[in-house]
């Protein structure tokens, strides 16, 4: 038997197979320019504010340049081809339409917008987002019904009391991709919040697992997309969807640069008082 070049467990079907390189998000959804991928020990310098760095300051850090967009070996050829033609095409069209609206309407960062998109395939877009989230996590969160949902294009059986999907618009080219993380806020009884997020111009989305009932995530809830049939196409009204800059690699951190600077300054002041 020929040795496999990129063997691994496919993130969708779960089988041990030869994995193929996949653009995450899809190449034609504005993921075709070179990106610098930072190894963990470099990324943590930005995350932790080492050497007085602000979260968007990656100058001088040692990363590897990925030519032609962010790619990963996640899926076997069959799953890559299936999810590509069933879901990613619709997602790519959606991203292109969103880009056209942002450009034509001249959206400003920090505001929220309402608009209608015609001829949208809601279930396909929902499944594209769920596939991309599964790509960056392990074993479909151990949920066989989620695996079945992704592997069968017509399947609509998804538990939206367990999975809550939220979406927003992003202006920045710097992608933020985070596998499942527990966000703990010690001042807030609603935590911890379990989430996995992907944001890359022009769309960001975060999946929340077993979201606490009284916790309201950022963005608009798009669980309704999962209620449509695979071939359903409709005109969809988006109401009050936020458009923002991504300024840190922390999951679900939607602060503006000004807010982050203020936060760093107040922490520094508090430390001086303690000294
Ligand atoms: Zn597979």
Image: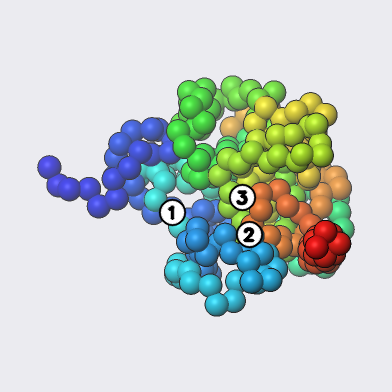
Q: Position of residue 88 (x, y in %)?
A: 54, 47
Q: Which mark is residue 47?
A: 2
Residue at numbered disc 1: 72
Closer to us: mark 3 or mark 2? Answer: 2
Q: Going 50% across and 61% down the picture, which residue do you hit?
A: 41
Q: Position of residue 180 (x, y in %)?
A: 58, 40
- 176 on left or right of 138: right
**Residue toward you, 196 or 144:** 196
As drawn, the residue found furthest toward the bottom would be 60
Q: Could you tell which of marks 3 and 1 lies nearer the N-terminus?
A: 1
The scheme the figure's colours follow is rainbow
Residue at numbered disc 3: 198
Q: Quadrant of residue 273?
A: bottom right
Q: Going 75% across and 28% down the picture, which residue do you hit?
A: 212
Q: Quadrant of residue 100?
A: bottom right
- 5 on left or right of 54: left
**Is the residue marked by circle 3 packed among few (<14), some (14-19), or many (20+) residues within 10 Å?**
many
- How far apart marks 3 and 1 lie (CA) works out to 14 Å
Q: Going 50% across and 40% down the picture, which residue do you hit?
A: 137
Q: Going 55% across and 61% down the picture, which residue do you hit?
A: 43
Q: Is residue 232 visible?
A: no
């Amino acid at each position: 038997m020929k040795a496999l070049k990129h063997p691994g467990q496919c993130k969708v079907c779960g089988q041990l197979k030869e994995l193929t390189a996949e653009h995450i998000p899809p190449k034609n959804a504005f993921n075709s320019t070179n990106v610098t991928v930072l190894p963990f020990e470099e990324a943590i310098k930005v995350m932790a504010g080492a050497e007085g760095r602000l979260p968007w300051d990656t100058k001088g850090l040692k990363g590897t340049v990925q030519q032609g967009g962010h790619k990963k070996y996640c899926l076997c050829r069959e799953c890559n081809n299936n999810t590509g033609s069933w879901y990613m095409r619709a997602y790519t069209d959606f991203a292109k339409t969103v880009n056209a609206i942002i450009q034509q309407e001249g959206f400003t960062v920090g505001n929220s917008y309402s608009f209608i998109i015609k001829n949208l395939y809601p279930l396909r877009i929902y499944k594209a987002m769920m596939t991309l989230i599964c790509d960056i996590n392990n074993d479909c969160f151990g949920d066989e019904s989620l695996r079945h949902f992704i592997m069968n294009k017509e399947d609509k059986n998804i538990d939206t009391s367990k999975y809550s999907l939220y979406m927003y618009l992003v202006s920045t080219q710097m992608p933020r991709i985070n596998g499942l993380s527990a966000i703990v806020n010690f001042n807030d009884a609603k935590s911890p919040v379990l989430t996995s997020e992907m944001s890359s111009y022009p769309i960001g989305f975060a999946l929340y697992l077993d979201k606490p009932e009284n916790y309201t995530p950022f963005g608009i809830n798009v669980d309704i997309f999962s209620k449509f049939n695979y071939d359903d196409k409709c005109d969809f009204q988006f109401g009050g969807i936020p458009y923002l800059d991504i300024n840190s690699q922390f999951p679900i951190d939607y602060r503006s640069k000004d807010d982050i600077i203020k936060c760093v300054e107040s922490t520094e002041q508090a430390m001086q008082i303690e000294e």
